[in-house]
Image (cartoon, rainbow, N blue to C red):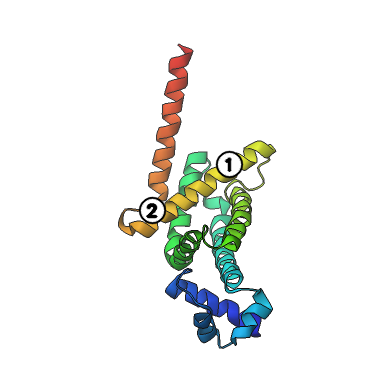
Amino acid sequence: MGHREDLLVGAKNCLYTKGYARTTARDIIEASGANLASIGYHYGSKEALLNAAIMEALEEWVQELKRALADVEDLPRDPVGRFEVAWTRVVDLFERHRPVWAAQFDAISQLDHVPEVRSFFVEAQQQAQQGLIDLFLGSTELPARSRAAVGQFYHALLSGVMMQWLIDPDHGPTGKSLAEALRTVLEGMQRSDSGMAV
């Protein structure tokens, strides 16, 4: 590997062990074996390097999730059943990738202090929302307005699930509990619609 790749690997290791806010440029240099000037040369700043490390780690998670969701043959035909199986797989993958989610939430806490972190997450959030639609709905065609809303919904759900698992892993949501909640909400809406129709 060259210095650029070494720095990325070192930055990921630091994210997992120290978190975003506590990682210094010297920590990355120690973990990577590169020199201090190479951070500026290859990435421009420590923050840009850490952002790139988060993106690569999240992309690894996305690729693993895609593989987990790729076998549609064993997914139930009913939408809520598919939802349950898909989210069970999301949660199952979480424990292996827990450090990257912790690092991401740590980085988000820096939004008001480091403008380039906010810029990074604005763009990353938009990409994530579109990517989640593709993951969970596949090639389903949606109007632009609906697509944006569905992306925001899935992103809110994913972020909320991961945050609950980080805070209290013994009581985090499961695919089964999320599906139960979805059924309850849908049934409540149907009852409400029926009552209005009367």
Looking at the rendered structure, the kind of residue marked 1 is Val
Q: Quadrant of the C terminus?
A: top left
Q: Position of residue 19 (x, y in %)?
A: 45, 70
Q: Quadrant of the N terminus?
A: bottom right
Q: Nearer the viewer, residue 98 or 53?
A: 53
Q: Say if 197 sits above or below 100 in the image.
A: above
Determine the residue positioned at 57% across, 70% down: 47
Q: Earlier in the sequence, mark 2 or mark 1?
A: 1
Determine the residue positioned at 67% across, 46% down: 139
As drawn, is 49 to the left or to the right of 20? Answer: right
Q: Which residue is mark 1?
A: 150
Q: Position of residue 55 (x, y in %)?
A: 59, 65
Q: Say if 32 sits above or below 172 in the image.
A: below
Q: Say if 77 sits above or below 30 in the image.
A: above
Q: Nearer the viewer, residue 117 or 59?
A: 117
Q: Are marks 2 and 1 in contact (CB under 8 Å)?
A: no
Q: Secondary structure at mark 2?
A: helix
Q: Position of residue 33 (x, y in %)?
A: 56, 88
Q: Position of residue 24 (x, y in %)?
A: 50, 77
Work out how far the residue at label 2 is from the one at label 1, CA to CA, in angstroms: 21 Å
Please give the count of numbered marks on the rendered protein. Answer: 2
Q: Tell me if I can see residue 1 in this picture.
A: no
Residues packed near mark 2 inside 10 Å, few (<14), some (14 to 19) or many (20 plus)? some
Q: Which residue is mark 2?
A: 164
